[in-house]
Amino acid sequence: MKLKFLLFLLTTTMAGQLMADQGVLDEPIDLDLKQGTRKEYLDEIESRTDLNFSYNPETVQIDKIIQLDVRAQSIRTILTEMFDDQELDFILRGKRVLIIKKQNNPNQKSTLSGHILDIATGEVLIGATIAAKPIESSSDWFGVAANTYGFYSLTLPSGTYDLTVTYIGYDAYTTTLDLSSNQTINFDLNEESTQLEEVIVEASAYEDTPEMNVTSTDLGKSTLDIQTIQEMPALFGEVDVIKAVQLLPGVQVQGEGSTNFFVRGGNADQNLIQLDEATVYNASHLMGFFSVFNPDAINYMQFYRGHLPAQYGGRLSSLLDIRMKDGNDQKFGVSGGIGVTSSRLTVEGPIKKEKASFMLSGRRTYVDQFFRLSKDESTRDTRIYFFDLNAKFNYKINDRNRIYASGYFGRDLNKIQVLQYLIDWGNSNGSLRWNHIFNEKLFSNTTVIYSKYDFLIDLSDEDTPFYWSSKVEDITFKNDFNFFPNPKTTLAAGFIGTIHQFEPGMSRDEPQNDVPTSKSFEGAIYYSADQQVTSKLSLNYGLRYSFFNLFGSTTLFNYGNNFEIISEEQTSGVYKTYSGLEPRFSARYLVGKSASIKASYNKNRQYMQLLSNLSLGMNVFDVWYPASKNIKPQIADQLSLGYFQNLADNAVEISLEGYYKKLKNQVDYVDHSTLIMNRELESELRTGTGRAYGVEFMLKKNGRLNGWVSYSYARALREIEGINNGEEYPALYDQPHNISVVTNYRLSDRWSVSTNWVFSSGRPVTLPTENFRYDKYIVPIYGPKNAERIPDYHRLDIGFTLLPKPKPNRKNHSSWNFSIYNAYNRANAASVFVSSELKDIDLVKDQDKSAFHKLSLFTIIPSVTYNFKF
């Protein structure tokens, strides 16, 4: 706790219960002091008794000089005479006497507000909770969570409270506070220390502090601690936040090592991924084997797959909200790692201590550098690599204003000279943010955002040109407000507007094949409330109104019944508008102190879709395509119901959730579609309905042995006219059974071991049911769409982390991470294909030969990474 930010500090020890017996204050004593300050008199009493005094210097005029002749008077009488000009109460708690302002007006309220921070770095702790309990009554706790910028506000009846501040991975902080006036206090938390010995939990003032996973109204929400993610075994040793998300219940994965994920029956494009509030349109590196998120640059990650707060929209299934580190405002530091495939380096520190700080982080693969050693010129010119650059700056103007500027730039280059093959893609993101505190109850955030994703593929040779590029570019302005009127209600409201520029496909050499570009404006306004109705019932309700205007000059196609073009037209101005309401509602009902039942309903609208070749489960190319005159926005209605319980003093968390989702205007493309070099791309698309339902179970363990076990049963079905004869079929990511077992165990001061075991049903695939012969060729006849499945997927990963020997005041830290991906060497199928062969013999006697083969990408992969920090 930074003392200069505290108005007073009453106690940092465990708080006991309020003692009814105040007899100690009635015991007589003598004082030798005849004249002095009130503080000197209190010091004298402390020297003659076992008592200690705690008070607020702004409430108690402690430096006033007084004169008393004390002979055989009770302590209570002495205190009353000392403060005869002030209306104070003297409350005995154990051996501590609280001197607090007498509450003449029981309706008077005061507000406690500020930020919750990491004491070592000054980073805000997003979602940290602060709970307050009156010491003079048995009332329930009042609690609030810090918002996404670390700000909290708690308005309470004036009085004295036990406070508990908690955050995952940090030691709880407890104190007693006399809240007789509005106060601004920044709470600093210490990172949790590792205890290998048996931990004995004793009764404390915060043992009944409400646990947010039980008491909040959130369903399908997960917060993952970056340190836990960094200890997980990973492919090629590359720690990946998206790979961690893929281990959560309700999340399906398609393909070996892919960064694609599918949530509760939704497509990959139905997940909103944000980095410092900027949309990341393609989160993959190296065809999807790695994500664009460098863990060294990440401070916080929250994942919503159920109830989506009203301030977020534009996607149907989930939100992955990732925030970069602000930069250490206490001291300079360097961290990084050297791995098998890449290295990374992060530098952060104060520009002006506790006023301004920065963070710079970079990562690059270097496999391509080995090609330079080849004697073959074409091999030397081969380039296969990716890199990331993260940067952030923040400046505290004053206690009420702070600005942040952050950016991300990442690129992939896959150039194989001998094959005349080039694929290049990347993301560019930037955010400029202003946090402003109007008063103790009202907080605002204003943000300007830039996002761009572009892609190109060049397979041209001397005879055949083949160059195709695609791009989506956004400029966004948003303003969010948080209002904390009382401890039982939190309100949020705001608006957002985005100008989109879509270039779905451009051909450098054959402009007649260009897909028409388009511009659009997507906007929304929202309001939401989080309200505690009774001690058991809490509600979160809100309404979002979104709209989508297509405008500008472009070419529109009019299609006939068979999706053939019957005419073209040129547009100008606003030529198409979509809009609609998106209600959000969730409720929580407590069943005892450690269990609750929750329910929610969400409606979401999505005004763009991703056209992607996922035949191998990898991001081979991505084309973002907006809603148009012919393609309506996607809509989803989702109902969820869940049961949540904590056991063993909150060391074990259990949740069981079920959901049903109805989807409209779902987009799929017809068989044998041409998605590249096709000006009439829209003619390949069909729309229809979908439904998804499932059950998710999760058991999470905290402590020396930590991790979770999750099981999901999930179905995702589509019914689209023109596909599969109009009959319902499983979506490409329909994988009913999914199991994840994630563990981390601290073996000693230096060694820890982590394991991941995953299982999922084989994904659907369309296979031929018979063949026919045409001349010398065997032509397959395919059965119903996605009627078959590739073999089930399962894999075990193991990781070991070696830390340096513990030393007092160690400033430099390093560790070795050894991991084994796919430890039991299973050849999982990434895809299934058919090969056929016809031998040059008597065609009457010869039998057509065809066989199904599975394509496997990875077997066992060991890796080692060296990490350092100083």
Image (tube, grey):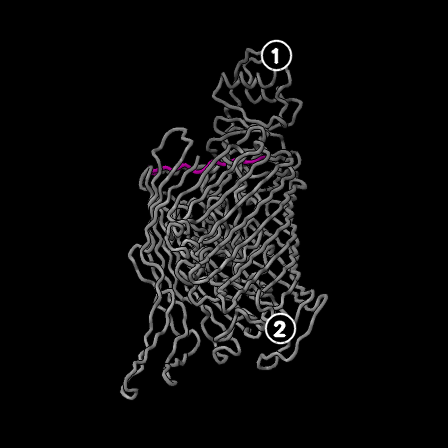
In this picture, residue 756 sits left or right of residue 482: left
Amino acid at circle 1: Gln
Q: Position of residue 870 (x, y in %)?
A: 44, 34
Q: Looking at the image, is 599 positioned above or below residue 803?
A: below
Residue drawn at 29 percent across, 89 percent down: 844
Amino acid at circle 2: Asn
Give the CA separation, mark 2 to mark 1.
89 Å
Asked if one can make out residue 646 in the rendered structure from this viewpoint, the answer is no
Q: Which residues are magenta?
A: 185-198
Q: Point out the residue furthest to the bottom here.
A: 844
Asked if one can make out residue 413 in the rendered structure from this viewpoint, the answer is yes
Q: Which mark is residue 630?
A: 2
Residue drawn at 48 percent across, 28 percent down: 94
Q: Residues within 10 Å of mark 2 (few under 14, many from 20)?
A: some
Viewer-proximal residue among 593 and 588: 588
Q: Position of residue 649 (x, y in %)?
A: 41, 44
In front: label 2 or label 1: 2
* Residue 855 picture quarter: bottom left
Look at the magenta stretch and give its main secondary structure.
Answer: loop
Taking the magenta stretch, the answer to whether it contains residue 193 is: yes
Q: Position of residue 443 (x, y in %)?
A: 64, 44
Viewer-proximal residue among 598 and 261: 261
Residue that numbered label 1 is attached to? 35
In this picture, residue 589 sits left or right of residue 519: left
